Amino acid sequence: MNSDLKDANATVSIPSLVLKSIFNDCDRHDHDETGGRIVGGFRRGVDGSLEVSVTGVIEAGPNARRSSTSFFQDGDYQAEIFRQIESAHPEVEHLGNWHTHHVNGFPNLSRGDIATYRRIVNHEKHNLDFFYALLVVSRLAGGEGISRYCIRHYILLRGDDAVYEVDPAKVTLTRDPPVWPLGSKPEPSKTEAGHSKEVRARDSATIPDLFPALRPYWSKRAGTLYWKGVLELVDGSWIDVTVPEVVSWEYGEASCYQVLAKKVPSVCAGVYENFSGRQFGSAAQAVSAFERELNQSLYRAINERSGQ
Ligand SMILES: [Zn+2]
């Protein structure tokens, strides 16, 4: 514990599924800060000690803004989710926030973080007289599952400028199901993750030969890979295609691929329509099938024209 931080005289309990959800979010944003709201309950001991019980975490939301040193949450989205949680769990409170520094290496709350949290805890609309902050500090080399990130816990009190750190020995993990996210899905098993890595490797080996005008890109927002470029058709025309990797919950959470296209010739509109929602085991399979069916429909159109 840092010498400038005081002991919080607090305990924290947190479901391991909440930590899992936080760490998965950190994996998805490995260049930008990310975070979310923490909800739950609390109890005060007669000796003034504080028991914080985390029961859920609300994701940053679709309009969150992120950079490597800053992070702004989508408050409207989070307020809506909070109302949903509240309707099922009227006792729930907004305990605080979590965010990550594993992308910039700051091992502690920044001055900006502390200023923000002080403003919140001293705000007349803040229900509680404390604010709980969870900080993801770093990714641990060789760590797995919920041991793969190092985290710290802080408490700020209303009308008190100190920042208190919760003794790691007073943090316990529970097996309780979180109130949010609902139906937290278990992490894809090793074989599935390994499988999608294999597929990516095979695509990287074959696509440059088969479709040299397609290139792989990484979607930071979705944490997935996609291929993008142009596809030359049998009549010499070109269309723009994007082949995103998507997670298919129906197929055991395995990654699969879809085809999106622009500038599709009107004779091929029916083919493209048939491809909407179709999923393929690899990007190469997706593009090959798309190219084949587009060319077939172009041939048919050419034959019909010459037959007239
Ligand atoms: Zn920060």
Image (cartoon, helix red, strand yellow):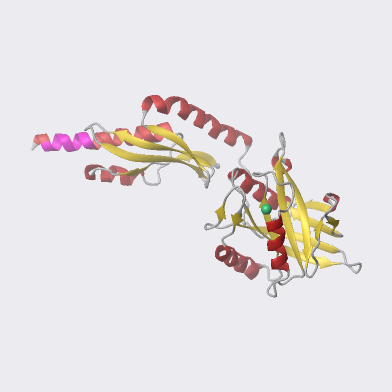
Please name the residue shown 57% across and 50% down the image. Answer: 67
The residue stretch that appears in magenta? 298-305
Please name the residue shown 63% across and 70% down the image. Answer: 87
User: Residue 227, percent across and down?
Assistant: 43, 37
Q: Is residue 74 above or below residue 30?
A: below
- By secondary structure, the bulk of the magenta-drawn segment is best described as helix
User: Residue 96, percent across and down?
Assistant: 70, 62
Looking at the image, residue 198 sits to the left or right of residue 118; the answer is left
Looking at the image, residue 216 sits to the left or right of residue 254; the answer is left
User: Residue 147, percent across and down?
Assistant: 74, 41
The residue furthest bottom is 124
Locate the C terminus and report the quarter of the image it occupies: top left
Question: Which residue is at the front of the view, 251 or 123?
Answer: 123
Residue 155 is covered by the magenta coloring? no
The residue furthest front is 111
Residue 39 visible? The answer is: no
Question: Which residue is at the front of the view, 210 or 276?
Answer: 210
Q: Is residue 28 above or below residue 58?
A: above
Residue 72 visible? The answer is: yes
Question: Which residue is at the front of the view, 119 or 99?
Answer: 119
Please name the residue shown 37% across and 28% down the image. Answer: 212
Q: How many marks?
A: 0
Question: Which residue is at the front of the view, 207 or 290?
Answer: 207
The residue furthest left is 308
User: Residue 287, percent across and down?
Assistant: 37, 34
Looking at the image, residue 240 sits to the left or right of residue 140; the answer is left
Please name the residue shown 40% across and 46% down the image. Answer: 277
